Amino acid sequence: MKVPSHQSPRKPSSRKIFPLNSNGSIFWPPTLISNSRNPNQCRRLRAGYKKILAAVSLLVLFLAPLTSASAEVLKITINDTIQPISAEYIGRALDEARRRNDQAVLIEMNTPGGLVESTRQIIEHITTSSVPVIVYVTPTGGHAGSAGIFILEAADIAAMAPGTAAGAAHPVALIGPVQLKPDEEMKRKMENDTAALMRSVASKRGRNVDAAEGAVRESKSFTEQEALTQHLIDYVASSPEDLFRQMQGKSFKRFNGESATLNLTGQPVVGFDMTLRERILDRLMEPDLAFLLLAIGALALYVEFNHPGAVIPGTVGVVFILVAAFALNLLPTRFAALFLILGAFALFAAEAKFATHGVLTVGGIALLTLGGLLLVDSPIPEMRVHLVTALAVSIPLGVITAFLMTIALKARRNKIVTGVQGLVGETAVAQTMLSPQGKVFVHGELWDAVAPSSLPAGQLVVIRRVDGLTLAVEPLKTSAPVSAAPAAL
């Protein structure tokens, strides 16, 4: 087909082609809104764009806290012994830090030590954490004893405040106030096992393995300057802010061998507290409190058994004993010591029955004290029942228990003065002639009575037995007849 001479061929356009609306303008929302000849369509479009903008604004506001949370440092405080609740608390904090995408976790620690099993759990939590962990021994005068130095060496960054100490991690076994002396083979096994754990965490963090192992094998303790000089810790800082300033831009070695850097200066530090459940369990983990609950619960049950139907002592006893059993289940408990405590209560009961003038009570107090001291087998004094506590509980408890048992036995030996059995041995007056049956007057009541022989009215008689509604009586010796009492109905 030929193109007419008065027309030139159309050249392809290099401009981007946009779709056109009905009036020939480019289809673009603002143009469409302004040029639309349909008012209803214009209002609908404007309302739609307003909803989109509102949704975007809400999304930005929702994501803003999550964005800012990633720049925080999560702080927890360990100012107690190392036990299962401490391990649970630290593990939960590290999980929370990972979920929030925090930059680091700061553990402020002041501990005398604790249980080896709980220490291993904490080390596992720290070494497998994707969030760097900073362990800071504080305040001044605080220390990371025994289990504490293991946790300190396991941290990505180890620091101590001025005037603090760490070390003395040699494994020991204590029962009450007595330190056990295990045989050489067992001692060597315990020492080698804990020393291997220390070498493992110290070498992975690039710290002084020999000095760290010395804290285990030779029970060495280090001041903050000695620990810094021997490269057991990375920094000595007077406060967390000072620590963050010293760490700024410096690399450290993670447990998997990779190097990392933290810039925490000026970053917000957010505290992470124990839950109510953890706080309650942490208090129950005190051996003194567990022993006190157990002793009070046993005393309450003892009172309930001697006064059936009182209900309140029995309820209190069951609750206290169950709570004490729960706490002792979390502690390194020697359950054989419970038999000593039961034996103590048996001696208290025997004292009231045999009246040994306090000999059995003293024996019961000694057994109860010994049972308390042997109840928790812990490697550190802070996690065992103290001698003062054992005596303060055993002596009053022994005296009270023996006193209550004495009262109960005396009450059982007393003559019954109420009911039908209370009539036996009482003196009555023959209201009518007993031949051998008749009526007698006793306690303001007329009773049918039977005598072994005929007795005149007014004769004083003694009630020997009660057979249903009939009294078996005998004449009262050396007694003269008295006038019959008027019957009162």
Image: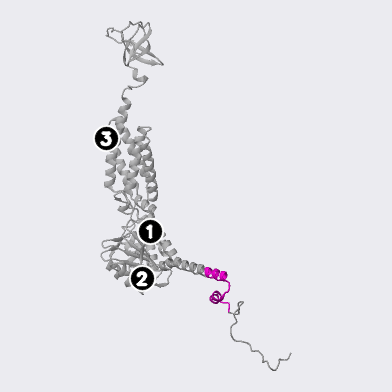
Q: Nearer the viewer, residue 7 or 343?
A: 7
Disc 2/disc 3 C-alpha distance (Å): 68 Å
Identity, as a three-letter code, of the amino acid under mark 1 = Thr
Secondary structure that dominates the magenta span = helix
In the image, residue 360 above or below residue 247:
above
The residue wearing badge 1 is 119
Which residue is tagged 2?
Answer: 264
Mark 2: which amino acid? Leu
Viewer-nearest of discs 2 and 3: 2
Mark 1–mark 3 Cα distance, whole angstroms, equals 45 Å
Q: Is residue 61 magenta?
A: no
Where residue 124 appears, x then y in whole percent? 42, 61
Above or below: residue 194 compared with residue 414: below
Q: Is residue 108 above or below residue 300?
A: below
Residue 46 among magenta residues: yes
Disc 1 on helix, strand or loop? helix
Give the number of the mark in front: 1 or 3: 1
| Crowding at mark 2 (Cα within 10 Å: few <14, some 14-19, many 20+) | many
Numbered circle sitting on residue 359: 3
Identify the residue at the far right of this view: 1
Q: Which residues are magenta?
A: 26-48
